[in-house]
């Protein structure tokens, strides 16, 4: 299979990144939004948690729906819902209306995230799919890294409501790019309709199939830890090391390069040693990063940064490799498999973010425990490595 054109690749990466952009761009503005809404900062955490919950559940619907109707109408319809939700948030005068808009955003953007993976699976499998997902991750890594910095700059210049204008424009741009560049990737003869009972049975079969479940759980564990890192690292940096909001944004922006490096390494390593071996190696690095953070408090800021880089590099190996391993055997139900994978990832993100925020210990230790736990869970869940000969023949 030939490599995808660069505009095709960039469009799928933008689809994947839109959900993370929708959350991380708001992080610097949450205190200002709380003041405008007359809400406590604690209550404003619902702006993030509701988004993750709706996003997780919506994926279970949009994946099978796209298996029936095709990818194009579901992606474009979802992006229209996302744009409508962003407009509601931009004009919201109280927390209730803001949360309603966030729910619409999450339901709409779920289609973009799920179907970016499904579209990739429609065209590729095996090592080419792993390579494509790795390249997508390299591009989309800029979203969590750069969006807090972008959010802080936009808020400082035009206020927090302008952040939702940015999201409206982003949704319109991604919709136009998808319609003009990617289009439909699921031919009519490969579409299928499943009644609700069959959908439930299909999800049950996927969960019972180790070919899907093991790499999916490994990917979910590591991405859950990553979201905990996004949510907790700003507190560690500001309260523990005296960072300003701009310095926090710069920290996340520079961390992108670690993920870039891992995304480039993952497909090459998978082609040489096999996906399961790379998955386990990445999980071991993530675990090592968490342990180093837990035991290296005395090293101060530089110890924290070094441990975070080790974790992020391990995460960058696990994410595309695990997704490729989970989706490759299920061409006939790529939308449903991608939806369930996304649901597991967001459920893990919600759970591990909550754990990192509520553990009765100081924030760096809590974060370190969650990162190490995510790496350990990913290592345990990962499928056993194949032999070198089988890896080369796969």
Image (spheres, rainbow, N blue to C red):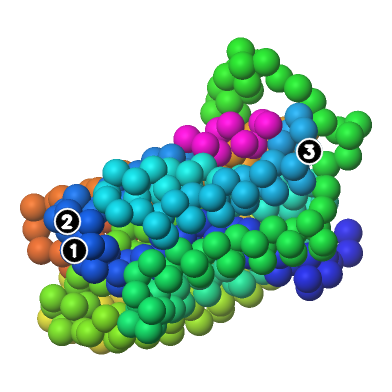
Q: Which mark is residue 158?
A: none
Label 2 neighbour load within 10 Å: few <14, some 14-19, many 20+: few
Q: Secondary structure at mark 3?
A: loop
Total of numbered circles in the picture? 3
Q: Which residues are magenta?
A: 57-65
Query: In the displayed structure, would residue 313 be above or below residue 303?
Result: above
Q: Tell me which numbered mark, 3 or 2, is placed earlier along the sequence.
A: 2
Prevalent SS, magenta region: helix
The answer to whether mark 1 and mark 2 are in CB contact below 8 A is yes
Q: How far apart are the alpha carbons under marks 3 and 2?
A: 43 Å
Q: Which mark is residue 70?
A: 3
Query: In the displayed structure, would residue 171 be above or below residue 328?
Result: below
According to the image, label 1 marks what residue? 35
Residue at 27% in and 81% down = 245
Label 1 neighbour load within 10 Å: few <14, some 14-19, many 20+: few
The answer to whether mark 3 and mark 2 are in CB contact below 8 A is no
- On the image, the x and y values in percent for residue 186 come to 83, 42
Q: How far apart are the alpha carbons under marks 3 and 1?
A: 43 Å
């Amino acid at each position: 299979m030939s490599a995808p054109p660069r505009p095709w690749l960039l469009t799928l990466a933008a689809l994947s990144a839109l959900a993370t952009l929708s959350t991380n761009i708001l992080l610097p503005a949450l205190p200002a939004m709380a003041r405008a809404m007359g809400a406590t900062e604690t209550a404003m955490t619902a702006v993030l948690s509701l988004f993750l919950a709706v996003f997780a559940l919506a994926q279970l619907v949009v994946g099978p729906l796209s298996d029936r109707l095709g990818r194009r109408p579901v992606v474009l319809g979802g992006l229209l819902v996302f744009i409508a939700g962003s407009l509601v948030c931009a004009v919201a005068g109280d927390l209730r209306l803001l949360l309603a808009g966030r729910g619409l955003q999450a339901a709409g953007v779920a289609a973009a995230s799920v179907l970016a993976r499904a579209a990739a699976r429609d065209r590729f499998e095996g090592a080419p799919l792993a390579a494509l997902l790795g390249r997508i991750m390299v591009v989309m890594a800029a979203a969590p890294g750069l969006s807090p910095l972008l959010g802080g700059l936009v808020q400082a210049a035009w206020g927090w409501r302008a952040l939702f204008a940015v999201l409206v424009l982003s949704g319109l741009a991604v919709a136009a790019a998808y319609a003009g560049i990617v289009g439909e990737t699921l031919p009519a003869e490969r579409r299928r309709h499943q009644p609700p009972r069959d959908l439930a049975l299909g999800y049950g079969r996927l969960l019972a199939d180790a070919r899907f479940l093991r790499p999916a759980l490994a990917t979910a564990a590591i991405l859950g830890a990553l979201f905990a890192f996004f949510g907790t690292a700003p507190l560690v940096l500001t309260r523990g090391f005296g960072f300003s909001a701009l310095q926090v944004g710069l920290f996340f922006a520079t961390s992108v390069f670690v993920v870039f490096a891992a995304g480039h390494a993952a497909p090459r390593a998978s082609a040489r040693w096999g996906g399961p071996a790379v998955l386990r190696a990445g999980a071991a690095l993530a675990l090592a990063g968490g342990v180093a953070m837990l035991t290296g408090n005395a090293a101060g800021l530089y110890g924290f940064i070094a441990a975070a880089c080790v974790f992020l590099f391990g995460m960058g190996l696990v994410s595309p490799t695990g997704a490729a391993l989970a989706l490759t055997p299920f061409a006939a139900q790529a939308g449903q498999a991608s939806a369930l994978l996304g649901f597991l990832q967001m459920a893990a993100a919600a759970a591990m973010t909550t754990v990192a925020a509520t553990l009765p210990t100081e924030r760096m230790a809590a974060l370190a425990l969650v990162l190490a736990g995510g790496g350990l869970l990913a290592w345990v869940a990962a499928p056993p490595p194949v032999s070198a000969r089988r890896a080369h023949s796969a």
